[in-house]
Image (cartoon, helix red, strand yellow):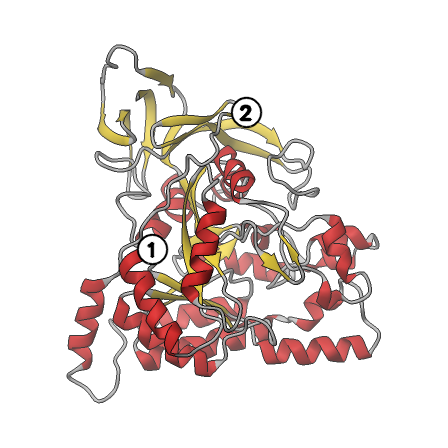
């Protein structure tokens, strides 16, 4: 199957230029002006549109068993919604129960994900430690294309990784050429504050942000960055929401430490007032961790994106419908944590970033696709429009108006975090492996068409680190 995209402006992270894009057998085979289509090729006229690499959402949770229920979105419906929004690949999470073999959990998630209609890969969480975890990490990197391991510093009594687990897992990841990723919230403090608030009779959704104040995130970010620095390990901090964590990342990067940061589009636009809505259901719908913050934190996140302190944007797509949120009707700590956003991430970031002058078009591509591809070692297979790359492409109309609503979205959830927002700029075509899967509002997806994407380890970098470290009794941070 062949496809020619004509008359568009190609936008990569580094530059923009006028060119046609020809795709064949799932790959981009030519990017230049004046291309002609062979007989039988599908042709898209991208006049007045931008031709960009498909989005990569590095943080989703499809079909996740969590807090006594399972997310309402499975891998088929979730990846379909992603494609409708211009995202052609997700990186989801395998989260073993404490005591469960990592490989067993991995194969369970792989089976669930076979229905995906967009490409996918997995981070694997380290929720406990023994020699089997050490062994399985090696097998996952060497045999199954996993190059990142997730660590939850939150959720005490469930999946929290304490400092002892971190100091075992981080060096193991280093020697394997894998990147540790971290959810930075002090789980001990959260647990204490939850119990304190409940004793005071605060049981509604307003207790959620009160039990997870910004300093709880900031302390954990500072601590894990210091641990990683001492061990000489690069790390990636997910869903930064607070000035305190942004400042910790900025300081570490200024000192030459390899720390990468992600933020969610939701945290850029929504503030903590949502938790004080008199309608319990509306307030509970916004319960996620970290919670939404006072508006000053949103300004800091935008500055961190434009200034390069944060490198990626994600959705943390983790859907729970109203009846599931109602599990915490009498206790905010039991409200399943999670919101949706995989479908609207790119349009919302474009409207409030590019249209408002906060981001350039090239920065938008970096933040929605290219940086994630580089950080998780799948560039230039993904994240760029160039010869030889996967034909994962979004044709973007910067003038297209759309009103966001739960009534029209493809996400399998009964609310939308951006309900009623009118955005200018949306995909008109989404292309996955050279096949048009979304065209002018119509999804054309196939169950199981998505491919599992191997992500190779960072062996050359890690070898250089080992050589550098051999010259000093202290582990040095790469500069």
Asked if 358 appears above or below 276 in the picture, the reply is: above
Which is nearer the eye, 149 or 135? 135
State the quadrant of the N terminus: top left
Of helix, strand and loop, which one carries label 1? loop
Where in the figure is residue 222, as x and y percent of width and height? 47, 76
* Extreme residue toward the bottom, this view: 473
State the quadrant of the C terminus: bottom left
* Res 376 label: 1
State left or right for residue 133 relative to residue 68.
left
Where in the figure is residue 31, as x and y percent of width and height? 23, 28
* Res 441 label: 2
Where in the figure is residue 348, as x and y percent of width and height? 55, 41
**Do tag 2 and tag 1 residues touch (Cβ < 8 Å)?**
no
Asked if 100 appears above or below 40 in the picture, the reply is: below
Which is nearer the eye, 270 or 334? 334
Q: Which of the marked residues, 2 or 1, is nearer the chain's N terminus? A: 1
Which is nearer the eye, 311 or 295? 311
Name the residue at 32% across, 74% down: 172
Q: Quadrant of residue 193?
A: bottom right
Where in the figure is residue 341, as x and y percent of width and height? 57, 46
Mark 1 residue crowding within 10 angstroms, few (<14) / some (14–19) / many (20+)? many
Q: Is residue 233 visible?
A: no
Name the residue at 57% across, 27% down: 401
């Amino acid at each position: 199957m062949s496809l020619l995209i004509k008359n568009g402006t190609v936008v990569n992270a580094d530059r923009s230029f006028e060119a046609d894009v020809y795709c064949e057998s799932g790959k981009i085979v030519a990017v230049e002006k004046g291309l002609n289509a062979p007989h039988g090729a599908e042709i898209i006229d991208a006049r007045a549109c931008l031709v960009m690499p498909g989005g990569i959402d590095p943080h989703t949770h499809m079909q996740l068993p969590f807090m006594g229920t399972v997310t309402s979105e499975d891998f088929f419906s979730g990846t379909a919604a992603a494609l409708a929004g211009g995202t052609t690949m997700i990186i989801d999470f395998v989260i073993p129960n404490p005591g469960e073999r990592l490989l067993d959990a991995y194969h369970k998630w792989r089976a669930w994900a076979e229905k995906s209609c967009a490409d996918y890969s997995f981070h694997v969480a380290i929720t406990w430690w023994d020699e089997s975890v050490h062994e399985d990490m090696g097998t996952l990197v060497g045999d199954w294309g996993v190059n990142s391991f997730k660590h939850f510093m939150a959720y005490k009594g469930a999946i929290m990784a304490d400092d002892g687990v971190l100091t075992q897992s981080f060096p193991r990841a280093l020697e394997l050429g894998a990147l540790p990723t971290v959810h930075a919230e002090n789980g001990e403090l959260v647990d204490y504050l939850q119990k304190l608030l409940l004793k005071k009779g605060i049981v509604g959704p307003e207790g959620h942000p009160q039990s997870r104040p910004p300093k709880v995130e900031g302390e954990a970010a500072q601590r894990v960055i210091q641990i990683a620095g001492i061990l000489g390990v690069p790390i990636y901090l997910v869903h930064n929401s607070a000035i305190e964590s942004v400042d910790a990342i900025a300081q570490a990067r200024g000192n030459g430490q390899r720390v990468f940061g992600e933020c969610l589009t939701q945290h850029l636009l929504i503030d903590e007032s949502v938790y004080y809505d008199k309608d319990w259901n509306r307030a509970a719908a916004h319960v996620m961790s970290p919670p939404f913050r006072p508006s000053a934190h949103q300004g800091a996140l935008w500055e961190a994106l434009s200034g390069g302190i944060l490198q990626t944007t994600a959705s943390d797509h983790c859907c729970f419908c109203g009846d599931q949120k109602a599990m915490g009707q009498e206790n905010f700590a039991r409200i399943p944590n999670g919101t949706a956003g995989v479908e609207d991430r790119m349009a919302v970031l474009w409207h409030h970033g590019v249209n408002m002058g906060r981001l350039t078009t090239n920065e938008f591509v970096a933040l929605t696709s290219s940086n994630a591809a580089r950080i998780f070692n799948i560039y230039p297979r993904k994240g760029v429009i160039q010869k030889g790359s996967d034909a994962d492409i979004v044709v973007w109309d910067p003038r297209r108006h759309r009103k966001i609503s739960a009534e029209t979205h493809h996400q399998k959830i009964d609310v939308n975090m951006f309900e009623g927002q009118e955005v200018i700029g949306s995909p008109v075509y989404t292309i996955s492996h050279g096949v048009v899967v979304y065209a002018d509002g119509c999804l054309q997806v196939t169950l199981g068409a998505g491919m599992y994407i191997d992500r190779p380890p960072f062996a050359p970098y890690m070898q250089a680190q080992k050589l550098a470290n051999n010259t000093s009794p202290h582990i040095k941070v790469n500069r």
